[in-house]
Image (cartoon, rainbow, N blue to C red):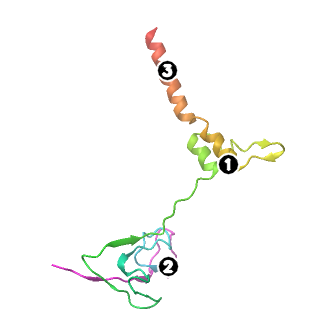
């Protein structure tokens, strides 16, 4: 059996609040995770992406093509990988905020040097845990 479905981006207007994520009456995408107005989920057939080889040329506002059950489907999510800031890196290492932001030759430390300092160090919580285990083991041997 081959079921087909039309692909479309549904939109709606919020009629009630959502814990402050949207104001009542705001225009929102119906296919969202309801935490961010930009978090739309759109399913599409990769063969229908505009290219010279497949001859498709979708235009904004045109009806969407049909998704076939045998087609390769994907979901578009607005995620992107981003680099951690030096402050976030310090927090992951168990340091205080701006722990590596020290002056160097009269200038603020560069971000790349701060990343290097964190990368060459050891995570404070892990080192504390190891220290506690060593002390406990030494006490057991007495």
For the residues labelled 3 and 1, say whether their Cβ atoms are less than 8 Å apart: no
Task: Name the chief secondary structure element in magenta.
Answer: loop
Give the residue at mark 3: 134
Left or right: 90 as drawn, with respect to 60: right
Give the residue at mark 2: 24
Mark 3 / mark 1, whichever is N-terminal: 1
Left or right: 23 as drawn, with respect to 62: right
Q: CA distance from mark 3 to mark 1?
A: 34 Å
Say which mark, if any, is on residue 112: 1
Residue at the (38%, 71%) spot, across then down: 75
Q: Residues within 10 Å of mark 3 (few under 14, many from 20)?
A: few
Mark 2 / mark 1, whichever is N-terminal: 2
Residue 142, position as x, y percentages in the image: 46, 8
Q: Residue furthest front?
A: 53
Q: CA distance from mark 2 to mark 3?
A: 58 Å
For the record, the magenta segment spans 1-27
Query: Does residue 45 appear anywhere in the picture?
Result: no
């Amino acid at each position: 059996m081959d079921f087909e479905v039309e692909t479309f981006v549904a939109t709606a207007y919020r009629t009630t609040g959502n814990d402050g994520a949207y104001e009542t009456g705001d225009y929102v995408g119906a296919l969202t995770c309801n935490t961010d107005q930009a978090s739309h989920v759109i399913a599409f057939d990769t063969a229908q992406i505009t290219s010279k080889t497949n001859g498709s040329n979708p235009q904004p506002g045109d009806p969407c093509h049909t998704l076939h059950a045998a087609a390769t489907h994907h979901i578009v999510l607005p995620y992107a990988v981003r680099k951690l800031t030096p402050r976030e890196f310090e927090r992951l290492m168990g340091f205080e905020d701006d722990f590596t932001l020290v002056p160097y030759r009269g200038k603020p430390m560069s971000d790349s040097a701060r990343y290097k300092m964190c990368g060459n160090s050891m995570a404070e919580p892990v080192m504390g845990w190891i220290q506690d285990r060593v002390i406990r083991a030494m006490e057991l041997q007495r």
